[in-house]
Image (cartoon, rainbow, N blue to C red):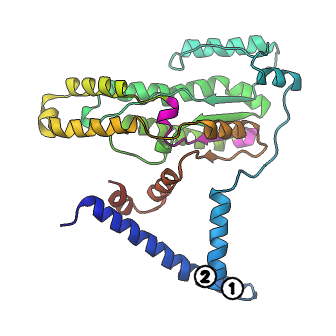
Amino acid sequence: MASLPALRAVLLVALSVFLTVVLGFGLPALLNAFMRMLGLPETSVTECIVALYAVFVLYVATPRIPRGLVEDKGGDGAKELEELHSDRMKVVQLDVCNEEQVNKAVDHFREILGESEAVLWAVVNNAGVSTFGEVEFTSMDTYKHVSEVNLWGTIRVTKAVLPLIRRAKGRVVNVASMYGRMGNIMRSPYCISKYAVEAFSDCLRYEMKAWGVKVSVIEPGNFIVATGILTRDIVATTANKLWSEAPSEVKEDYGKTHFEQNMALMRSYCSSGQKDTVSVLDDITDAIMSKRPHTRYSPMEPHWWIRMQVMTHLPGAISDLLYF
């Protein structure tokens, strides 16, 4: 019997061949029918394929098309801020899980702005934590803690500053993740929180349209190396906690060997991912400054982008066979 990796490879090749056939014959036929309906000359298969490939290249490979920038609020201050010694830069430390601290921070903002009708152009909700562990090894406290920061922290801060942002017709930028669009083994606490951030952002975007406020989601891929969010020390500490706190029945059923294999997989991730966060920062900047910001930005490596599309748009039975 063929091994699972070999089966997945065959399925990926079969999917590639299937898409090639569909694009090579089905799409041109549909386009030709459409052209006939419009009374225009039919195009050829080759032209269709070339056109489709050109669109793909434009979408994936070309730089972002400029969509205009909003005007700077005080050019001199912006220049000073770029030089990192602006008197207008204020640093406020707060715990996004603490309602009192968040409200005090907003009061501080109003004080600094010194206006009866103070406005705030943008908020970027970037505070987040991550962890790992299979569902039966993960405590309810862990689920609550991750969502308290990633989800409720995002909602708490957004609600607190939204009156100021509405007056400015400004921006809300929520940093989610590629795991806000697709799940993965041992990542349920993180995925749950990021899926919810995506849903919250969508609902808020619909509501804020009438106010002229733009809401964008940033969906970073794998930036483990760049951020240091997962190290071998973190894996070791988390692994000890997962195993020591797991019910005896769970440990007996899963076994130490299975557990150690998963921990070895997590250790292998410690040196993975992109080494520079500049693509994420560029997308956040665009979401704040563009006149027509995107609803979603997906700064990630091509193979993760393809996986996200497959898992988002193909039937679950197919994506499950390909990736799990």
277 inside magenta stretch: no
Residue 48 locus on image (x, y percent): 64, 78
Please tell me in which quadrant of the rendered image residue 212 appears: top right
Secondary structure at numbered mark 1? loop
Q: Describe residue 139's horizontal placement relative to residue 17 as left or right.
A: left
Question: Of callouts 2 and 1, which one flags the residue occurring earlier in the amino acid sequence?
Answer: 2
Residue, x 84% and y 27% (percent of image)?
73
Q: Describe residue 150's horizontal placement relative to residue 30 as left or right.
A: left
Identify which amino acid the numbered label 2 is placed on. Answer: Pro
Residue marked by disc 1: 43
Residue 242 locus on image (x, y percent): 26, 27
Residue, x 46% and y 27% (percent of image)?
129
Using the image as rendered, state which of residue 195 and residue 252 is in the foreground: 252
Q: Is residue 166 above or below residue 316?
A: above
Residue 126 locus on image (x, y percent): 57, 29
Secondary structure at numbered mark 2? helix
Please tell me in which quadrant of the rendered image residue 58 appears: bottom right
Asked if the residues shown at circle 2 and circle 1 are in contact, with their CB atoms under 8 angstroms apart, the answer is yes
Residue, x 31% and y 40% (percent of image)?
265
Identify which amino acid the numbered label 1 is placed on. Answer: Thr
Region rendered in magenta: 209-227
Q: Is residue 127 above or below residue 4?
A: above
Using the image as rendered, state which of residue 292 and residue 12 is in the foreground: 12
Residue marked by disc 2: 28
Q: Residues within 10 Å of mark 1 (few under 14, many from 20)?
A: some
Using the image as rendered, state which of residue 79 and residue 93 is in the foreground: 79
